[in-house]
Image: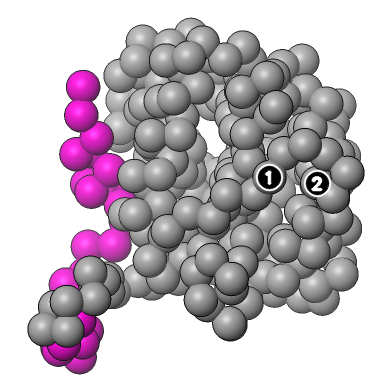
Amino acid sequence: MNNYFITQPPFSVNKKKNSPLINFVNKGLRFFKTGYNVHQLDTSVDMNTVEQRINFYHLLDSVIVNNVPGDIAEMGTFMGQCALLFQKTLSLRQSDKKQHVYDTFDVSFKFKGDVLEKLKDQFKQADLPLPVIHKGNFFDTLPAELPDALCFIHIDCGFGGDKFEHKKVMMHCLESIYPRMSKGAICILMDYNDPAENGVAHDIAPGVKLACDEFLADKPEKIIALYGNQYLHSYFRKV
């Protein structure tokens, strides 16, 4: 079993070569032995970086190998780039865990077409079983439509509006999933920015950290920052 598949479409949707400018920057980064490398991203369709997919793969694999009870849930799915990776990992491990995805599927960014139909088509092209699809607003689908037990959760409800409105959405997601997380279950938080860890001052989604820090303040779990190159994410493991 290997994870080379994470570099290939549909798990990685960006087929563009790096621009001359990015190649020049990478040359400078190598010269100064920084250990960093920049990949060209189209943020309207590239929902994650290869570094994040590596993290997703190993974190999900860990809960499968350690027999953490429960199913998988993703809040914020878009066309299914992450969901495809999760399902591929389940298939490679021959796991009987179910994946549940939650989204309105109304936000299309630059994509021209039906987002949900595109997701279904990508799963068909990848020869992977469809996840259980929950279409609707999180305040309608959560927690009512969650599985009784969860082993792995990915929250990526990116929000371009007011940070306090985003915090409200994040708090609802966390309040819904936390009681159903099994011991050892993992929750990954897209856009969680901890400048003390990653040195990134610019924060595109401050509502994520606001909600997570407040929610976990009286709980034993701690946030662990993950390296994701251009994108930020973190996780916590249920104690």
Position of 144 relative to 7 (above/below) = above
Q: Is 83 on the left or on the right of 135, as rendered?
A: left
Q: Give 24 or 157, whichever is nearer the viewer.
A: 24
Q: Position of residue 50 (x, y in %)?
A: 31, 54
- Residue drawn at x 67%, y 55% is 157
Residue 216, numbered circle: 2
Q: Nearer the viewer, residue 116 or 65?
A: 65
**102 vs 195, nearest the viewer:** 195
Span colored in magenta: 1-29
Residue 5 found in image quarter: top left
Q: Give the labeled residue for mark 1.
A: 222
Please give the name of the residue rendered at 22% of the width and 46% of the height, measured from the top-left corner. Answer: 8
Quarter of the image with the C terminus in it: top right
Place of residue 121 in the rendered image (x, y in percent of width and height, measured from the top left): 40, 38
Where residue 160 appears, as percent x and y from the top left, is 70, 74
Cβ atoms under marks 2 and 1 closer than 8 Å: yes
Q: Is residue 197 magenta?
A: no
Q: Looking at the image, is 220 positioned above or below residue 147?
A: below
Residue neighbourhood size for the residue with mark 1, other residues' Cα within 10 Å, grouped as few (<14), some (14–19), many (≥20): some
Q: Is residue 112 visible?
A: no
For residue 65, which quarter of the picture? top left
* Amino acid at dot 2: Leu
- Relative placement, left or right, of 200 versus 213 is left
Give the residue at x 58% y 82%.
201
> How was the colour assigned to the protein in this rendering?
one colour
Q: Is residue 210 left or right of residue 104?
A: right
- Residue 27 within the magenta-colored segment of the rendering: yes
